Image (cartoon, helix red, strand yellow):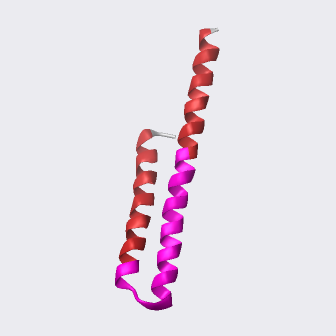
Amino acid sequence: MARRTRTLAFGACAALVLAGIVCAAAVSGVTGEVLTIVLLSAGLGGAVLLVFLEVGLGEERDRASRRGRR
């Protein structure tokens, strides 16, 4: 995964979180609550998944460099 793609993915997650915060402030009632929960969950969940991806890719790079040294 290219660095630019990862940066855009993290940016999209941040945008979803910000949209959820705006919806919490701007939209009232049950609709606002549902939108807030969905947007925040998608943004924060996506960020967690991307962090796990980063950790996995780092481990793969370490493994590949160890194999290259042998």
Which of 32 and 11 lies nearest the eye of the viewer? 32
Which corner quadrant of the image does residue 45 belong to? bottom right
Q: Which quadrant would the C terminus be assigned to in this image?
A: top right
Which of 7 and 2 lies nearest the eye of the viewer? 7
Which corner quadrant of the image does residue 65 belong to? top right
The residue at 40%/79% (across/down) is 24
Residue 40, x across and y down, in percent: 48, 68
Which of 65 and 18 lies nearest the eye of the viewer? 18
In this picture, residue 56 sits left or right of residue 44: right
The residue most toward the top is 70
Residue 49, x across and y down, in percent: 57, 51
Q: Which residues are magenta?
A: 24-51
Above or below for 32 versus 1: below
Residue 28 shown in magenta: yes
Above or below for 62 versus 9: above
Q: Main secondary structure of the magenta part?
A: helix
Tell how many labels.
Answer: 0
Which of 34 and 9 lies nearest the eye of the viewer? 34
Residue 4, x across and y down, in percent: 40, 43
Residue 7 shown in magenta: no
The residue at 48%/79% (across/down) is 35
The residue at 48%/71% (across/down) is 39
Residue 68, x across and y down, in percent: 60, 13
Above or below for 44 versus 32: above
The residue at 41%/47% (across/down) is 7
